[in-house]
Image: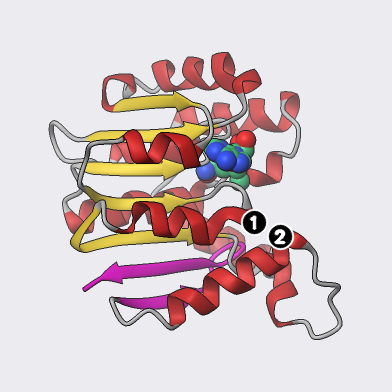
Amino acid sequence: MLEMDAELEQYILAHSEPESEVLAELSRATHLHVLRPRMLSGNLQGQFLKMICRMIGARRVLEIGTYTGYAAISMAAGLEEGGVLHTIDVNDELEDFTRCYMEKSGLQERIVFHVGDACEIIPTLNEVFDLVFIDADKREYSEYYRLVFDKVRSGGMIVADDVLWDGKVADPQVKLDAQTKGILDFNEMVQADSRVENILLPIRHGLMVIRKV
Ligand SMILES: C[S@@+](CC[C@H](N)C(=O)[O-])C[C@H]1O[C@@H](n2cnc3c(N)ncnc32)[C@H](O)[C@@H]1O
């Protein structure tokens, strides 16, 4: 997490849309029962993703990296009537836990949950997406981007999480592990891509917000 004063964070949350009961329960249960709970998006980022869905009138959304479903449920809540969110995760051990909260949210009819490798599943999806949220293996970000690009409508959005990678992207002392290299390559590729407009926002672990022109 990028350093933020705890009181300031409380103030920000107190002046943003509150977390729904189901998402609060999902967050608690994830922290209690699931490994690596810091991967969960949380209320601020969840509300931001939902707001993007509202702003662009999203009907077709793809999430790469479901984990326990926090962002999936957040974005599904922001879809237009008749909208569908596809979400993919390779970890089948979390499937029952995650499906349980999708059902509790009452939004399960809007969510298509695929269990498997995103690189194999994305080419099989016959959709044109308004928004793609990239949040899976950091080493594969550039590959996800290439796989989804032609499936995003013009004017559509791609949002990628963790692009500051705990500040490692701008730390000259950092040892270049495969994840950090994956993020650095992705950020460079997006920055050089003349087909998009992009802004890197310092929300949580860093969000690259990309609009396909
Ligand atoms: C950071 S978590 C996702 C968090 C989630 N988007 C949220 O907001 O709560 C990353 C997830 O990506 C999944 N993942 C990693 N590699 C993957 C792949 N090749 N295909 C699909 N999912 C993958 C992991 O199993 C993990 O659950």
Kindly check if marks 1 and 2 are in contact, taking CB atoms under 8 A apart as contact: yes
Identity, as a three-letter code, of the amino acid under mark 2: Gln
> Which color scheme does this rendered protein use?
secondary structure
| Quarter of the render that holds ligand 1 | top right
Mark 1 CB lies closer than 8 A to ligand 1: no
Q: Is residue 145 left or right of residue 82?
A: right
Magenta stretch, overall SS: strand
Residues rendered magenta in the picture:
196-213
The residue sitting at 32% across, 82% down in the picture is 194
Label 2: element kind: helix
The residue sitting at 42% across, 34% down in the picture is 121
Residue closest to the eye, 71 or 141: 141
Q: Is residue 24 magenta?
A: no
Label 1: element kind: helix
Q: Marks 1 and 2, how far apart in space?
A: 5 Å
Q: Is residue 75 left or right of residue 137?
A: left
Q: Is residue 187 left or right of residue 198?
A: right
Residue 11 is situated, as x and y percent measured from the top left of the image, at 54, 63
The residue sitting at 28% across, 76% down in the picture is 195
Quarter of the figure with the C terminus: bottom left
Mark 2 CB lies closer than 8 A to ligand 1: no
Residue 201 is situated, as x and y percent measured from the top left of the image, at 48, 73
Quarter of the figure with residue 31: top right
Pointer 2: what residue? 179
In the displayed structure, would residue 62 be above or below residue 88? Answer: below
Specify the label residue 203 is tagged with.
none
Residue 67 is situated, as x and y percent measured from the top left of the image, at 58, 34
Specify the label residue 139 is tagged with.
1
Q: Is residue 211 magenta?
A: yes
